[in-house]
Image: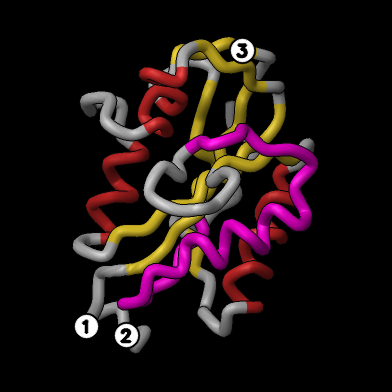
């Protein structure tokens, strides 16, 4: 079932631009280093997908998940969100596919509730990150959708 009017559940990939090399305290994980470039974060929301995505895009939030710490840093910006509607939790399958093309990943980031090595992957270029996310959904037979209809990847 993938009808937008009937379902607001699914899996998403945040494509995050980091403007320069940074060090960020990520809760109990401590200070982690992030390189300039693009990171893909994979998550799911089996209650309300649209609210989860909007929360990630907002600066008005409490730090709850690993990704919140990163997104609240002034040197980060979500460039695009690739998502799909689904009643099944497929974030680990999507994460596995994205890991195959990623240049690197942040170990144990965003995956404390599963067996994945990470849910945050590094890419040098926006186009590589976006293409990899779209292909990951397509390989799982899901229709990838984009949150931003314009190309926000070039905006600072």
CA gap, disc 3 to disc 2?
Answer: 40 Å
According to the image, what is the colour scheme of the structure?
A: secondary structure
Above or below — where is 123 with respect to 28?
below
> Do the residues under discs 1 and 3 have CB atoms within 8 angstroms?
no
**Residue at label 2?**
3
Kindly state the secondary structure of the residue where label 3 is placed. Answer: strand
Q: Which residue is found at the position 29% from the left and 46% from the top?
A: 54
Query: Which mark's residue is nearer the viewer, 3 or 2?
Result: 3
Residue 106 covered by magenta stretch: yes
> Do the residues under discs 2 and 1 have CB atoms within 8 angstroms?
yes
Q: Which residue is found at the position 50% from the left and 13% from the top?
A: 24
Residue 14: mark in rendering: none
In the visual, does 89 lie left or right of 136? left
Kindly state the secondary structure of the residue where label 1 is placed. Answer: loop
**Residue 29 visible at all:** yes
Nearer to us in this view, 127 or 49:
49
Q: Residue 147's spot in the image, x, y percent? A: 44, 57
Q: Earlier in the sequence, mark 3 or mark 2?
A: 2
> Do the residues under discs 3 and 2 have CB atoms within 8 angstroms?
no
Q: Which residue is found at the position 78% from the left and 36% from the top?
A: 124
Q: How many marks?
A: 3
In the visual, does 136 lie left or right of 1? right
Range of residues picked out in magenta = 82-109
Q: Residue 95's spot in the image, x, y percent? A: 58, 57
**Residue at label 1?**
6
Quadrant of the rendering where the C terminus is positioned: top right
Residue 128 covered by magenta stretch: no
Kindly state the secondary structure of the residue where label 2 is placed. Answer: loop
Residue 22: mark in rendering: 3
């Amino acid at each position: 079932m993938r009808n937008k009017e009937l379902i607001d559940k699914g899996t998403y990939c945040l494509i995050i631009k980091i403007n320069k090399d940074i060090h960020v305290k990520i809760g109990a994980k401590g200070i982690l280093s992030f390189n300039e470039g693009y990171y893909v974060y994979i998550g799911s929301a089996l209650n309300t997908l649209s609210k989860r995505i909007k929360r990630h895009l907002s600066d008005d939030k409490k730090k709850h998940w690993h990704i919140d710490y990163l997104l609240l840093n002034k040197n980060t910006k979500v460039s695009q969100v690739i998502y799909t509607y689904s009643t099944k939790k497929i974030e680990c399958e999507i994460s596995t596919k994205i890991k195959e093309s990623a240049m690197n990943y942040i170990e144990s980031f965003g995956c404390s509730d599963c067996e994945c090595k990470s849910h945050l992957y590094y890419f040098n270029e926006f186009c590589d990150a976006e293409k990899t996310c779209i292909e990951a959904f397509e390989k799982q037979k899901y229709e990838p959708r984009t949150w931003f209809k314009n190309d926000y990847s070039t905006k600072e």
